[in-house]
Amino acid sequence: MGKAGAPCSGSSGIVSFLTAVPCLSCKPQPAVDRRMSDQGKGSASTSAGAPAPGSDTYKGWLFKWTNYLKGYQRRWFVLSNGLLSYYRTQAEMAHTCRGTINLATAHIDTEDACNIVLSSGGRTYHLKAGSEVERQRWITALELAKAKAIRMMHDQSDDSGDEEPTTQSDRSEIQGTLKTLASKLDDLSTCNDLIAKHGAALQRSLSELEGLRVPVEGGEKIKAVNERATLFRITSNAMINACRDFLDLAETHSRRWQRALQYEREQRIHLEETIEQLAKQHNSLERAWREAPALATNTPAAPAARKGNERPLKGEASDEDEDTEYFDAMEDSPAFITVADHTQHRTLCLCLTKETCQLKFSPYSYFSRDVPRKVTGVVTDGGGQAHYILSGTWDDKIESAKIVQSSRGGSGSEGKQKTVYQTLSPKLLWKKYPLPENAENMYCFSALALTLNEPEDGVGPTDSRLRPDQRLMEAGRWDEANVEKQRLEEKQRAVRRRREAEATDALDEECDYDSGREYEGYQPRWFQKRTDSLTGETIFVYKGGYWETKDRQDWNMCPQIF
C-alpha cells in the first residue's frame, strides 16, 4: 500500500486512490517470527522469546509438577487470549489439550528463583523455568495477559451495564426507524429509474446531434461531449447495477432480519427474567451459606483449652446483646480431663426455601491424615443442587467456596460414588480470635468473655454478672468463693425441692377432687414458651417488659436467686 496521499499501483495496473484501505493488488508482507532457537532437550525451558509489546501470545517449554513419583515433567505451554494451556508435546496442540487456566481470575506467585505458582479456583499449577531470565519472561507475559484479560472483562461488564430494558417508547422508535428506512429505499428505487430514463434520453440526444451537419470545430466539441456522456453512462450503469443489487438483497433479507430481531428481543426478555430469578435464589443461598458456620461451629471461647458445663442458676439472666458466657468457680487443684471432640453429622435447613447445609464433623484418629477437628459441608438449594462447599476446623476457621462445576468421581471407601466439585477461590467466613495474654491463667477465656463479664450499673438482680461467688473468684479470694458457691447451690436445691413438693400436692388434689388445680411449674419472667409453626419444636420468645422495667428500675417481680 502506498503512502498517504499517493496512489499505489499493483502489478495488474489497477490504481487505488483510497489511502486508508489496502490495495488488493499489493501482496501482504509476512509477519516477522521472533522465536528463539531451541536450546536442546536438556535445557530447562525453550520459549518463543520475550513478549512483544501489544502481543498476548507466548509459547515455550516449562517443567510442570505432576506427582510425587514423577516430579516435574517437561510440558509445552501456550499463552493466548488470556488463557494458559499446556500440552505434552507441540504435536498435541492440534487435538489434545491437557489443561487450561483463566488468567483473569488467577493468582500469580513466585516461590524462588525459577518457580512459578498459578492458582485459580480449585486448580494450582506448580511450574519451573530453566533460568531466572526465562522465569522473568514468563512472569512478564503472564502479568500482561492477566491485565489485558481483566480489562476486557471490565469493558464487557460496563457495556452490558449500559443497556436498559426495551420500553414501549424504544419499540415505537425502532418501528419509526424501520419505516424511514423503507421510505428511503423507495426513494432510492425511484432515483434509479430516473437516472436510467434521463441517461437514455441524453444518449439519444447526443446521437441525433452527432448526425447533424456542423463545422469541423463544432464536430470535435460534440465528439468530446459524446465521450464524456459515454463515460457518465458507464459510471451511472455501474451505480444503477449496485443499487439494484442492494435493493434486491434488502428486500430479500428485510423480513428475515425483522424475524431475527423479534426473536432476539424475546430471548433477551426471557434471559432477564431468568437472571432476576437466579439473583433471588442466590441471595437466599448466600444467607444460608453465611449462617451455617455460625450456627454449627460456634463453641464457647476455647473449648479445646477449657472444659466444663455451663450451669447458670434457675432464673439467672443477662441483658447483653451478644452471646453470654457463664463461669464456674473451681477449686485450684489438679484434675484429669478427657477431651470430647465434635464427631457427628448435622443438617441445617431453611424451612421456607428448603435450602440445606450438610455438615460433617470428622472424628480424630491417630492414623488419619486429615486435620484434627475438621469440618466439611455442602450447601444445596431446594432441588438438591449444590452451590457452595464449606471446609475448615471448628476451633480455628471456616472457609466457603462457590461451586462452578461438578462431576462424578470414583467409588469411595463405603462403595458410594463420589462427587468432585470444581470451585472458585475460597472466602473466609469465620476465624477464631487470638486469646489475650496470660490466657492460660484466666481459664483461656476470650476477650469477648472477659468484656461481657464487666459489671454494669442498673442491671436486674438476676443478671449473671452479680453472682457473688464469681466476683469473689475474680478478686482472687478462692476460699470465700468456694463457700459462696456451695451456699448458692444449696439454695438452688432447696428451691427445687419446694417446687417438687408443690407439684406433688397439686397431683394429690387432682386425684382427690374432680376439679383439681394444674401445677404450672417454673415460668420464665421475660420469655414465653411456644411451639414453632415450621419445625414443631418448643421455643421461647421474648414477650417484652425487661427494658421498660430496667428504665424504671423496678425489680420487685424478680426472684432473689443470689
Image (cartoon, helix red, strand yellow):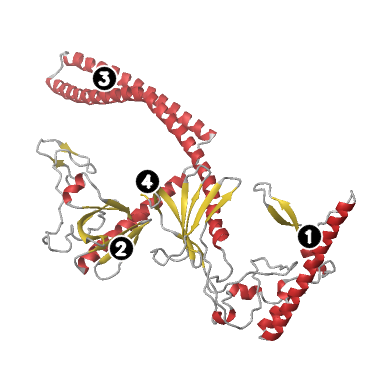
Identify residue type, mark 4: Arg
Q: Secondary structure at mark 4?
A: strand
Furthest-left residue in this view:
11
Camera-nearest label, 2 or 3: 2
Mark 4 and mark 2 residues within 8 Å of each other at the beta carbon? no
Camera-nearest label, 4 or 3: 4
Label 4 or label 2, whichever comes before in sequence order: 2
- Residue 199's tag is 3
Of residue 46 and residue 35, the one placed in the foreground of this image is 46
| 88 shown above or below 250 | below
Query: Quarter-wise, where is residue 315 in the image?
Result: bottom right
Spatial separation of the CA atoms under disc 4 and disc 1: 54 Å
Label 2 or label 3, whichever comes before in sequence order: 2
Label 4 or label 3, whichever comes before in sequence order: 3
Locate the N terminus and report the quarter of the image it occupies.
Answer: top left
Q: Which residue corresponds to mark 1? A: 523
Q: Which residue corresponds to mark 4? A: 408
Q: Which residue corresponds to mark 2? A: 117
> In the image, residue 295 lies at what x, y percent?
57, 59
Of residue 4 and residue 21, the one placed in the foreground of this image is 21
Q: Residues within 10 Å of mark 4 (few under 14, many from 20)?
A: few
Spatial separation of the CA atoms under disc 4 and disc 3: 75 Å
> In the image, residue 95 lies at what x, y percent?
21, 44
Identify residue type, mark 3: Gly
Visible in this render: residue 61? no
Q: Secondary structure at mark 1?
A: loop
Please indicate whether residue 82 sits to the left or right of residue 261 in the image: left
Mark 4 and mark 1 residues within 8 Å of each other at the beta carbon? no
Label 1 or label 2, whichever comes before in sequence order: 2
Please indicate whether residue 81 sits to the left or right of residue 89 in the image: right
Visible in this render: residue 499? yes
> In the image, residue 258 lies at what x, y percent?
41, 27
